[in-house]
Amino acid sequence: MKPESILAHEPKVLTQAQRETYFNDGYLVLEEFISPEWMKRIWDTTNEFIEESRSYKQSDSKFDLDQGHSSETPRLRRLTSPVSHHPIYWEFASQGPIVDVAEDLLGPDVTFHHSKLNFKWGGGGEEVKWHQDIPFYPHTNYSVLAIGLYMNDVDDEMGPMGAIPGSQFGPIYSHYNKEGEWVGAMRDEDAAKLPTSKTGWMKGKAGSITIHHCRTVHGSMPNNSNRMRPLLINAYSSADALTITSHPAPCKEALQVVRGKRPEYAVFDSEPCPLPPDWSGGYTSIFAAQQEEN
Ligand SMILES: O=C(O)CCC(=O)C(=O)O
């Protein structure tokens, strides 16, 4: 759906100025948007998964383990597809307050795409290099976004998400290296041309949310604090934007319409989108791809 048509609908929770900021800059932060009650429910569940991860010795399709992970000192990079592992995550993604935000920025009909919980553990939790999301999961048009929930207070030291304002209007970059291997990050020569001095660092207290457009160039630094920086990310599209490649984390929740109705038509953008590898054989995480572990 085009921004003009989206903006013509009455917003549920955002001001018109916040919606315009999102469409102009390609990202938005809403400070302490999620209630302490929701945060407690999400934290209680997440702590159960951290406990469970103690018995894991290697990464699989559920847990992506960081270097140094052990039963005594768990260290996770990601819980993949939390919505398929616990109903609380799905309740949050399909009925929580972030769905109103998705509706205000995508229009009345909204499809859920996927979720992930990036932990970025303290003491050097890995950086996420500059990238755009849409080459990971191309859709028929670009009305696609991701909403992140900071589960702890996030300051400069903790590897906040950073976005290049206005980059959603620019090119869609290759996320393959020169040898043609998928690395899930922009090439160094492309990244070197980015106006990184203009980066908007999205910081905020626990309960703050970040929103970024699927074409916005974004990334984050390593977490050099001693606190972990769990970021629960849920991605959505306007229902008229249909995904066109294998889903990286197939599950029964993926591609459900969480607001409004199923579309009668798919809308096609004329601008080509680079394709990712065929994920039908499995996908691990952006961390594994960027560290070229596969
Ligand atoms: O966890 C982060 O800091 C960034 C995550 C991200 O951009 C992604 O997983 O696509």
Image (cartoon, grey):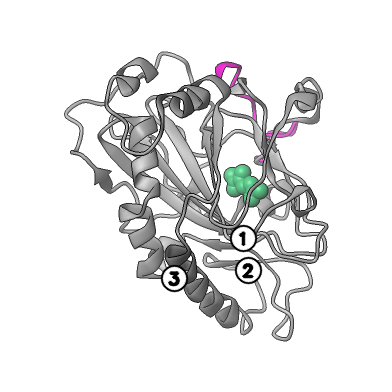
The image position of residue 154, as x and y in percent, is 68, 53
The magenta-colored residue range is 169-183
The alpha-carbon separation of the residues under discs 3 and 1 comes to 14 Å
* Between discs 3 and 1, the one toward the N terminus: 3
The reply to whether the residue tagged 2 has its Cβ within 8 angstroms of ligand 1 is: no
Q: Residue at x 83, y 57 (%)?
A: 224
Numbered tag placed on residue 230 in the rendering: 1
* Marks 2, 1: nearer the viewer: 1
Give the spatial CA distance, label 2 vs label 1: 18 Å
Q: Is residue 265 above or below residue 127?
A: above
The residue to which callout 3 is attached is 41
Q: Residue at x 37, y 36 (%)?
A: 237
Label 2: few (<14), some (14–19) or many (≥20) C-alpha neighbours in 10 Å: some
Whether residue 138 is visible, yes or no, is yes
In the drawing, does residue 259 fall left or right of residue 120?
left
Under tag 1, what secondary structure? loop
Q: Are marks 2 and 3 in contact (CB under 8 Å)?
A: no
Looking at the rendered structure, the kind of residue marked 2 is Ser
Q: Amino acid at mark 1?
A: Pro
- The one nearer the camera, 233 or 20, is 20
Nearer the N terminus, badge 2 or badge 3?
3
Q: Indicate the quadrant containing the C terminus: top left, top right, bottom left or bottom right.
A: bottom right
Q: Kindly indicate the quadrant of the structure image that contains residue 100.
A: top left
Q: Is residue 72 above or below residue 283?
A: below
User: Which numbered disc, 3 or 1, marks the residue closer to the eye?
Assistant: 3
Q: Can you identify the residue that label 2 sits on?
A: 59
Q: How many C-alpha atoms fall within 10 Å of the one at disc 3: few (<14), some, or many (≥20)?
A: few
In magenta stretch: residue 181: yes
